[in-house]
Image (tube, rainbow, N blue to C red):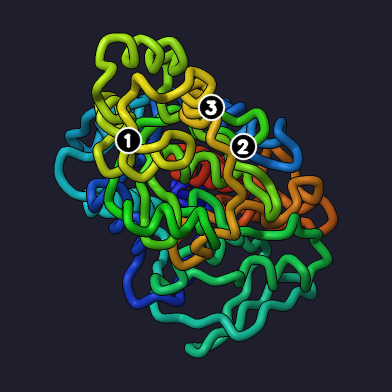
């Protein structure tokens, strides 16, 4: 995006990529259909040490601007839930569009070029295993280390450190959470069970699907909440969003006194989950023999199940990296390093992390455009 924008403004642009093919993260996104932006994109849906940093770029190149570009290239798309936009066809259409935009700007794309050194005298000099290149400006658009099997690395951080730019400690985000001990013993047999929930960490609350895994919890609600989690932090789960559990359980006891608690729970929860949770507070007796205080304790668990994750599944399963190049070192208008004129950083390399659902792509488009306008 940065290269195409600068190229179409008449700049001479060289785009270096160490991969053998471009856009591998684009191609796997959205199940191969690329969730390329979100209709509800707004600054408050991004995490950063400076929550106001993303405002300028997002306002100057909006989701509607990118949608207009998609329409100009004749790419059919549709909205799924929560404003998420996907290609009707393939993510390859978005990649082809970006390559076509770069070509229209005369951008020279060189693949399979591994950078071995970056220096700066009067100009930036980038040395690769295919020779050296010089330019008055350099844009770091290399993302973060999430999904290393696709070639992702912390390269941008290394260059930032070299030029004295501070970092907010990077960490995996939009990532499944792992558990140990009794919690994992309960979750592991439930692998594959999914249900709607509200997942909350701190003040951040997300109502979406949750999925039990062999290592803990995943699914959109958990991935969203994971971006706000730090080691030692607590996860709060509401397994019956929008329902008042205590009156329902008491009414169920009156209506079906001979039923077992797990049978009642299975009316609103997946059966395997109901069977697993019932013994935590309810004995395997007919509901008529279960004290109301035990039902209230189960209701409290269903509405506020408190868990402490042991960790995450790491960069290998993280959809994005939180943290990165400190925004305090960059101009919010053009993404240029304040102390190093001509050095720019965009996208995931920067300490701006969006919610799940197309927000991180939009940050890539907006920040890349902002840098491209200043080159």
Q: Image point 58% across, 53% down: which residue?
A: 309
| In this view, 239 is above or below 152 | above
Q: Which mark is residue 195?
A: 1
Residue with the mark numbered 3: 297
The mark found on residue 201 in the picture is 2
Residue located at (65% from left, 83% from top): 117
Q: Residues within 10 Å of mark 2 (few under 14, many from 20)?
A: many
Left or right, residue 237 beside residue 170: left
Q: Nearer the viewer, mark 2 or mark 3?
A: 3
Q: How many marks?
A: 3
- Work out whether 231 lies above or below 131: above
Q: Position of residue 304 (x, y in %)?
A: 55, 29
Q: Tell me which label, 3 or 1, sits earlier in the chain.
A: 1
Measuring 43% from the left and 34% from the top, which residue is drawn there? 282
Which one is nearer the viewer's eye here, 341 or 329? 329
Could you tell me which secondary element the residue under label 1 belongs to?
A: strand
- Using the image as rendered, state which of residue 46 and residue 161 is in the foreground: 46
Image coordinates of residue 244 in percent, x first then y, are 45, 13
Q: Earlier in the sequence, mark 1 or mark 2?
A: 1
């Amino acid at each position: 995006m940065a290269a195409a924008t600068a190229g179409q403004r008449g700049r001479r642009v060289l785009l270096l990529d160490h991969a053998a093919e471009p856009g591998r993260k684009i191609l796997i996104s959205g199940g191969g259909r690329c969730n390329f932006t979100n209709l509800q994109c707004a600054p408050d849906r991004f995490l950063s040490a400076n929550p106001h940093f993303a405002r300028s770029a997002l306002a100057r190149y909006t989701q509607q601007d990118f949608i207009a570009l998609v329409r100009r290239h004749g790419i059919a798309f549709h909205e799924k839930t929560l404003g998420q936009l996907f290609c009707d066809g393939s993510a390859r259409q978005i990649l082809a569009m970006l390559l076509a935009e770069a070509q229209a700007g005369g951008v020279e794309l060189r693949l399979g070029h591994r950078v071995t050194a970056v220096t700066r005298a009067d100009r930036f000099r980038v040395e690769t295993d295919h020779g050296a290149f010089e330019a008055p400006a350099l844009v770091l658009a290399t993302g973060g280390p999430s999904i290393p099997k696709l070639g992702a690395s912390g390269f941008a951080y290394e260059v930032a450190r070299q030029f004295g730019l501070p970092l907010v400690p990077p960490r995996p985000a939009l990532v499944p959470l792992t558990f140990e001990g009794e919690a994992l013993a309960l979750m592991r047999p439930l692998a594959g069970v999914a249900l709607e929930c509200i997942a909350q960490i701190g003040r951040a609350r997300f109502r979406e699907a949750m999925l039990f895994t062999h290592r803990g919890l995943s699914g959109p609600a958990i991935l969203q909440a994971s971006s706000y989690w730090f080691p030692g932090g607590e996860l709060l789960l509401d397994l019956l969003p929008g329902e008042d559990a205590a009156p329902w359980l008491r009414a169920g006891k009156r209506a079906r006194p001979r039923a077992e608690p797990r049978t009642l729970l299975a009316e609103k929860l997946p059966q395997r989950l109901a069977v697993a949770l019932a013994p935590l507070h309810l004995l395997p007796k007919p509901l008529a023999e279960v004290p109301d205080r035990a039902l209230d304790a189960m209701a409290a668990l269903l509405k506020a199940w408190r868990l402490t994750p042991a960790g995450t599944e790491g960069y290998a399963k993280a959809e994005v990296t939180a943290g990165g190049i400190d925004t305090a070192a960059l101009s919010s208008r053009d993404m240029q390093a304040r102390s190093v004129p001509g050095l720019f950083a965009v996208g995931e390399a920067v300490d701006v992390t969006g919610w799940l659902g197309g927000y991180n792509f939009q940050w890539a488009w907006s920040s890349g455009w902002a840098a491209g306008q200043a080159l």
